[in-house]
Amino acid sequence: MTDLQSPDLKTIVMNQRRYEYLLRQTEPPTQAQQWLIDQTNALGASAEMQIPHEQGVLLTLLVQLTGASRVVEIGTFTGYSTLAMARGLGADGQIVTCDLSSEWTEIAQQAWEKEGVADRIEVRLGQAADTLRAMPKTEHIDMVFIDADKVSYQQYWELLVPRMRPGGLLLADNTFYYGEAADDFPTGNAKAIDEFNSHVRADDRVESVMLPIADGLIVARKRTKLS
């Protein structure tokens, strides 16, 4: 295992100065995105569920790079990640986003309308697992973003992988879970995330990497054929 003091450790530990530099080198938020950032911050403690802007830029790029047109999101919150992915879609692209809260998704809807992407987004309120089970059992989804209740990540994964097209991307957020997933004996949500991470790592249907962006992000690609 790489020692934290070893020159082999290439990951930069983020601090305020470095993060501000990162943001200066990143495409700034659109007016609609900034409006949504402000509206979400006004919610108080729950605002921490919103992904950071630089992660949103990455989502936009991944949609564009893959040419995804059928996207599924588990966990809408106030819709920042949804908006980011919708910005990368072509005119005929569509996102199905799943959440339980009409209060939060109403804020999201306003932001999507401001950005001009509301027609590309369909909100489905209710248990995400039920929504996924109701989807066709065919390989039709191009990209997935999971950012919801941590104990259900494995369940969502198993419902989604068979529905992904070969070469499609699956992304899962919070895979460090505040760093607690790396503890020797994680508990609660951290334990669920640790088990999920191990599940993905062992899944021969995909090839995957965990990125040290924000609170950790798994990016997995469904294999075109099993090796």
Image (cartoon, grey):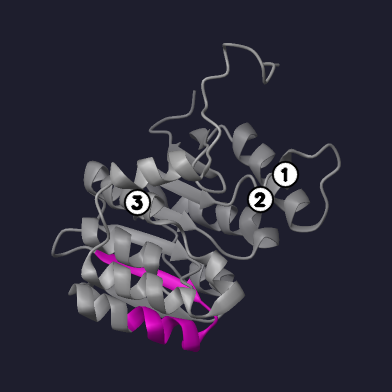
Q: Amino acid at mark 2?
A: Tyr
Question: Is 4 placed left or right of 86 in the picture?
Answer: right
Q: Is there a contact, CB below 8 Å, between mark 1 and mark 2?
A: yes
Q: Which mark is residue 177?
A: 2
- The residue wearing badge 1 is 181
Residue 72 placed where, x, y %?
40, 62
- So how many labels did they put on this image? 3
SS type, badge 1 = helix
- The residue wearing badge 3 is 59
Relative vertical location of residue 25 with respect to residue 73 in this rendering, above or below: above
Cα separation, mark 3 vs mark 1, equals 23 Å
Question: Is 85 placed left or right of 145 in the picture?
Answer: left
Residue 44 placed where, x, y %?
57, 77
Q: Amino acid at mark 1?
A: Ala
Q: Residue at x 53, y 52 (%)?
A: 173
Please indicate, yes or no, whether residue 221 appears anywhere in the rendered image.
Answer: yes
Q: Residue at x 50, y 45 (%)?
A: 16
Q: Amino acid at mark 3?
A: Leu
Q: Which residues are magenta?
A: 94-109
